[in-house]
Amino acid sequence: MANPLLENWDGPFKLAPFDEISDEHFEPAFEEALEAAREEVVAIAENPEKPSFANTIEALEASGEQLDKVLSVFFTVAGSDSNAKRQELQREFSPKLAAYSSEVTGNKALFERIEALWQSRDNLDLTDEQQRLLMLTRRRFVRAGAALSGESDKRMREIMGRLAELGTQFTQNLLADESGWYMELDEQALENLPEFVVSSAREAGREKGLETPVITLSRSLIVPFLQFSPRRDLREKAFRAWEARGAMGGETDNRAICAEILRLREERAQLLGYENFAAYKLETEMAKTPDRVRDLLMQVWEPAKAQAERDADVLTEMMQADGINAELRPWDWRYYAEKRRQAEHDLDEAAVKPYLSLEAMIEAAFGTANRLFGLEFKELDVPLYHPDCRAWEVSRNGAHIAVFIGDYFARASKRSGAWCSAMRGQAKIPKTQGPVVLNTCNFAKGDPALLSYDDARTLFHEFGHALHHLLSDVNYGSISGTSVARDFVELPSQLYEHWLEVPEVLEKYARHYQTGEAMPPELLEKMLKAANFDQGFQTVEYVASAMVDLTFHEGGAPGDVMDKQLETLDKLGMPEAITMRHATPQFAHVFAGDGYSSGYYSYMWSEVMDADAFASFEEEGGPFDEERAKALESHILSKGGSADPEALYTAFRGRMPGVEALLKGRGLAA
């Protein structure tokens, strides 16, 4: 029987035919596509012709197309709509993909061709983009161990295969803990909760086949519960379960997995001649060295910690005024911070949410992109992988650019968090193709779905990543879109969040879901003034996580990761009532794969730039300044990884920024 994953996709925009694909198709398609990719790589390596950019580098760019198609579908559904079969296939595919990657980078004949081109690069008459691609390709091979031989080469392959297995297991363990825990709420526990929390809890209960409302470990549900529930006992129970994800004991415990990952990463770096994994990983980032990362984080840590300690004193007084003579604990902070916000800013989040419906915020993100970049969005009726998903054609001046897919709601089968991915990247060589871009979020489902201000910022953040894909205009797919340094990739996403703070955007789109009336000016003003509220807390929990990540990878691999975490936080003087944003056993950014390992700091590195970049709009004609928008697209959003990120930012802004704009933006400046 024909396998739709291996057929030509001739439907609208050549999208995957999700309505024809079943789980039984994945394994045979994967095996066939993997073998085809292997054969293509061998053919490149054994080509009897003299190495050329076309028959080696461009040939590598064109190889593995069928495998990419299969995996784009599989990893999309495995992350967003998992089931037992898909988890089994993930465990099976991961080591095979790691072995294949090692085969490619370990192919000595292939590396010799790449090295020959590198040594003669000045005589090849390459464009700047081709020079960059050649450099990146060679660097990728060298950093993967292509120059190793003998036992070192063999050991590197073993390490990469094992790391792939461990990353998959970490993710699946975390998903099991998150989807397996819930807390039922009786009518008494629902008292004093805002209607949007009650509605979301009832919806979560229905999804689990229960008649009672429940609190799950989905961030978009548990955080509002911690903010609004007056029941300290229930807050503590929910928070402890949330904090225990990945460390609940038994088969899903991630602590030993984290320790083994750190040991293998250290060995991997040392095989390549680096002192430690942080030195290896940061070499290709904008930061370059662990010392520069630590310097940035500590510049922010001290003022953030000082603010958090002042805030803790205020919250403790509020708690004691409620008759609770105890120390302020992590399950108390959000509750009393919310009460303080309501008192100081007279802002009730329950009053805000009716104006921030999911539909309105999608329109706001699209409308802002239209004003800045001329993009237009038309909803499509095409088969997708889940009924909750929606798709839009993206065009400009009548010309097709891309397809954008939104998958916004939390469900037990979806891993936590929010992310952007490209099911197909933009490219012109070996053939022209427009991107297919996916934003995945975990908003609480409702009728309608109402977002908090933080949820709306998440939507804008992920759409900023999407714009990096949508506006990409390079020749080669491997350097298109978000294929940039990790500490540069968050610039477009964090920068786009600023447009949610623009009053004229909210005046137009923040409208009551029932009446259609605009958010009252006084409520809008309160919401924007409160946007920087509790930044001491938010900055401390983030920087603590980034420092633990850096410390894990900068020194010797710890035998006990929890002891090392505690030691690091003690040295920082971590406030007792605040925890890391992501405790080690649930730190998917760092342990689900290599993406943000030694790189969690990158959100803050990018924030230094995004604060400065938005200031450039304000210094000129305002948030929608036409020339600044053109510069942003031409120097950053369209360039992908085709040039050095520092050169791209300098071309956009004229200089690199300092930390002052970030501290001012977070309200932490002296």
Image: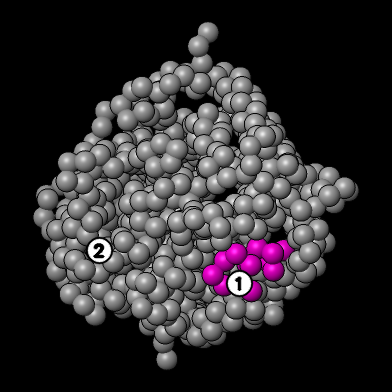
Residue at image x 52%, y 61%?
485
Query: Which residue is at the front of the view, 111 or 3?
Result: 111
Q: Where is residue 402 drawn, in percent x and y? A: 31, 41
Q: Is residue 365 visible?
A: yes
Mark 2, Cα crowd under 10 Å, few <14 / some 14-19 / many 20+, is: some
| Residue under label 1 | 288
Residue depicted at 47% across the width and 77% down the height: 536
Q: Which one is nearer the viewer's eye here, 595 or 362?
A: 595
Q: Residue furthest top?
A: 1
- Amino acid type at mark 1: Lys
Rendered image quadrant of residue 658: bottom left
The label shown at residue 597 is none
Q: Is 282 covered by the magenta stretch? A: yes
Q: Position of residue 482 (x, y in %)?
A: 45, 53
The quarter of the displayed image where residue 230 is located: bottom left
Q: Is residue 478 left or right of residue 434?
A: right
- Disc 2 marks which residue? 630
Mark 1 near mark 2, Cβ–Cβ under 8 Å? no
Position in image of residue 383 (x %, y %): 35, 25
Which amino acid lies under the numbered mark 2 shown in the image of this protein? Lys
- Magenta stretch? 277-289
Answer with left or right where residue 648 lies relative to residue 55: left
